Image: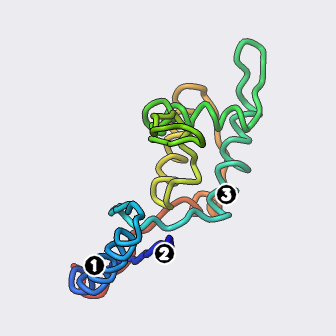
Amino acid sequence: MSEVFTAVLQSKDAAREPFVRAMNHAAAMLDSGENVLLSVGPALEPIGVKQRKFLHGAVLKQISEQVSLGGKRYTIDLWKEHYRRRFLGDGGFRWVSMQLPGAKKATPRRIAISTEELGVRAYSKFTNEVIDDAISELNVEFVFTSEERELIAKKPPHHEGAA
């Protein structure tokens, strides 16, 4: 019974049925002796190949080509790690409680926050922060085609009846 029940809610009116199903699913898991994780948050749209390509192929590439610190150039991967730590909260790490094999109890572990965990909007925000920092702090002069720049411009979804 370790199957995960997942539902994406798009309106309060449609929420009741998934909540009832989730409650029944959780009850069955608890009855079978399993612990249940309850998590509610935004349904993140997964980042796409185009966003990754823009960050790596246009933004980080131009930073690595233009910036020399102390006479040394750094790779795209090192610039990405620098910005991940700088802009993804708590130095780019988060704490999770993990029970390792053979351990009697769970202990906190520090793990890196990955840009892959970001949704479309957060990834776009991250990319814009990288661009803004590179321009203001490193004097990078970006040259993007209009098509490249539009790849990270997330437009809010249009909902019927929305004002």
Residue 101's quadrant in the figure?
top right
Q: Which mark is residue 111?
A: none
Q: Which residue is mark 1?
A: 19
Q: Residue at x 34, y 62 (%)?
A: 38
Q: Residue at x 51, y 42 (%)?
A: 99
**Which quarter of the figure is the C terminus placed in?**
bottom left
Task: Mark 3 or mark 1: name the one nearer the start of the chain.
Answer: 1
Say whether marks 3 and 1 touch (CB < 8 Å): no
Q: CA distance from mark 2 to mark 3?
A: 51 Å
Q: Which mark is residue 145?
A: 3
The three-letter code of the residue at mark 1 reads Phe
Q: Residue at x 43, y 32 (%)?
A: 90
Task: Mark 2 or mark 3: name the one nearer the start of the chain.
Answer: 2
Q: Is residue 74 above or below residue 84?
A: above
From this viewpoint, which residue is outermost toward the top?
Answer: 70
- Count of labels in the image: 3
Relative image position of residue 128 (x, y in whole percent): 51, 46
- Residue 131 appears in the figure: no
Label 2 element class: loop
Relative to the observer, which residue lies in front, 15 or 21?
21
Closest to the camera, between mark 3 and mark 1, is 1
Relative image position of residue 143 (x, y in whole percent): 67, 46
Label 3 element class: loop
Give left or right: position of 24 versus 142.
Answer: left
Using a 10 Å C-alpha cutoff, classify the residue at mark 3 as few (fewer than 14 neighbours), some (14 to 19) or many (20 or more).
Answer: few
Q: Which residue is mark 2?
A: 1
Q: Is residue 14 above or below residue 29?
A: below
Relative image position of residue 15 (x, y in whole percent): 26, 81
The three-letter code of the residue at mark 2 reads Met
